Image (spheres, rainbow, N blue to C red):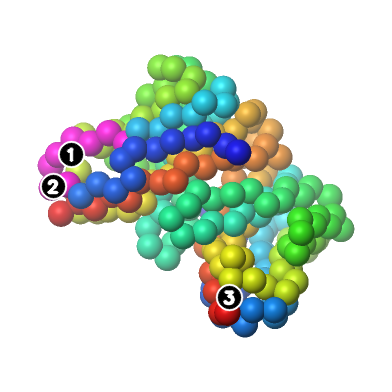
Amino acid sequence: ILNVEQSPQSLHVQEGDSTNFTCSFPSSNFYALHWYRWETAKSPEALFVMTLNGDEKKKGRISATLNTKEGYSYLYIKGSQPEDSATYLCAPSYYGQNFVFGPGTRLSVLP
Amino acid sequence: EADIYQTPRYLVIGTGKKITLECSQTMGHDKMYWYQQDPGMELHLIHYSYGVNSTEKGDLSSESTVSRIRTEHFPLTLESARPSHTSQYLCASSEGVAETDTQYFGPGTRLTVL
């Protein structure tokens, strides 16, 4: 099983703060990187899928970047709101293989 | 919005019982998946299916079995539940098999075996 790391494991921020977290993954045979948001008692929800080195995707206040050469992706949240509280999962996919999920970063945004 | 359903949402059961976790999707997706997540741990793929009559084992070994008789239905069965099976089980589906295809998840079944 491939080793996918996410840091930090958890963090607490105040409403209005901007924050970012990291997903690290093996770069060999890499194909795509998926980000999901998983709110408590709900289903994981897809945020982004990225494939190209230098890719940057944006959805509202959330954006993500991808470095396929060194095997990492950053997720940024600008002006965090309480509704952003969730676990953020990254999942790289590799040629001919299924997703491998990271352990997630649990974000709590305090009002 | 994705339409993928799992029942039951919560199940508490005694050791030795046979259980079936249901998963259905109304999107006509060919590929379906079962993931297991222990508290504080990653989602691990335990089974997947490319379509009707196709079932494959995932990365994490599991004593559970699955079947795919209809496109929309992908149930998971444990013949004899044990406390080590206590976990959360999530079902997902995707339209195709490409590495870029988004997986749509159900809400999960939280299983406790006493």
Foreground mark, 1 or 3, reads 3
Q: Residues within 10 Å of mark 3 (few under 14, many from 20)?
A: some
Give the mark nearest the N terminus, 2 or 1: 2
Can you identify the residue that label 1 sits on?
B80
Is A78 situated above or below B51? below
* Amino acid type shown at disc 2: Thr
Q: Chain of mark 3?
A: A
* Amino acid type shown at disc 3: Val
Closest to the observer: B65 or A64?
Answer: A64
Q: Residues within 10 Å of mark 2 (few under 14, many from 20)?
A: some
Q: Position of residue B96 (x, y in %)?
A: 64, 28
Q: How many marks?
A: 3
Q: Secondary structure at mark 3?
A: strand
* Range covered by the magenta-colored residues: B13-21
Can you identify the residue that label 3 sits on?
A109
* Amino acid type shown at disc 1: Ser
Q: Residues within 10 Å of mark 1 (few under 14, many from 20)?
A: some
Can you identify the residue that label 2 sits on?
B15
- Marks 1 and 2: in contact by CB < 8 Å? yes
Left or right: B17 with respect to A95? left
Q: Secondary structure at mark 1?
A: loop
Q: CA distance from mark 1 to mark 3?
A: 42 Å
Residue, x 61% and y 66% (percent of image)? A84
